[in-house]
Image (spheres, rainbow, N blue to C red):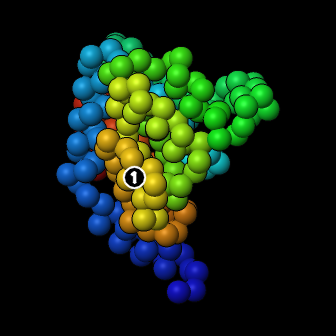
Amino acid sequence: MDFSVQNYLTQHNNVIEKLDIFEIQNAVNLIKDKFTRGNKIAICGNGGSALTASHYITDWNKMVYQYTGKIFNGICLNDNMGLVTAYANDFSYDEIFSEQVKYLLNEGDLLITVSGSGNSKNVIKATQVALENNVETLSVCGYDGGKLREISNNSVWVNSFDMQICEDAHLVFGHIVMKSLCNQKIFK
């Protein structure tokens, strides 16, 4: 299909309409439960997914406190460039998140990974380390879900092989979570 604004919006709407509402609601409930219990919630991703992960934490930390007065204990593992580059240089890029998971997250906490393909080695490694330490995992992924969807405890899957459509839908998920945490009304 050739690119046009109409074709992009049509494809976007078709993918959004096919999202699994039950899967999304389960993920929202998981995040709400971890928030209510005071568990840490860490998020990571690469490239556009890194910015999505950062966007999630920005919205969730700020808006939850603003609307509820409660602290959302969230951190984005890719936001500290000094730490990320230190691990990339001293270990390998594949370990930039898993090394942080080892000392930041405890049993019962939650690791959320964002990946368009679901096959980024560093988020897979972070998920494996989290699982070894009884940290619950949630993957937000696209394409066929990749290895990340296979190994994660929970997932939100966008069934599309168009990276930009996946990234759009991942942002939609983040906003759904934020509004749910804040119990915000949706205005027309």
Task: Residue 107: give x, y in percent of width and height.
Answer: 36, 19
Task: Residue 154: give x, y in percent of width and height.
Answer: 31, 44
Q: Residue at x 35, y 72 (%)?
A: 14
Q: Residue furthest front?
A: 132
SS category of the residue bearing label 1:
helix
Q: Residue furthest right?
A: 89
Is residue 59 at all visible to an observer of this figure? no
> Callout 1 environment at 10 Å: few (<14), some (14 to 19), or many (20+)?
many
Asked whether, in this view, residue 122 is left or right of residue 39, the answer is right
Give the camera-side residue of 85 and 53: 85
Give the camera-side residue of 12 and 6: 12
Callout 1, which amino acid? Arg
Give the camera-side residue of 64 and 188: 64
Query: Against 19, is 24 above or below?
Result: above
Q: Residue at x 53, y 22 (%)?
A: 102
Task: Residue 123: give x, y in percent of width and height.
Answer: 54, 42
In the picture of the structure, the residue carrying the numbered disc 1 is 149
Asked whether, in this view, residue 83 is left or right of residue 173, the answer is right
Query: Against 72, is 15 above or below?
Result: below
Is residue 4 at all visible to an observer of this figure? yes
Give the camera-side residue of 53 and 40: 40
Q: Residue at x 48, y 32 (%)?
A: 129
Task: Residue 115: give x, y in percent of width and height.
Answer: 52, 51
Quarter location, residue 92:
top right
Quarter location, residue 122:
top right
Quarter location, residue 67:
top left
Q: Residue at x 58, y 51 (%)?
A: 120
Q: Residue furthest bottom?
A: 1
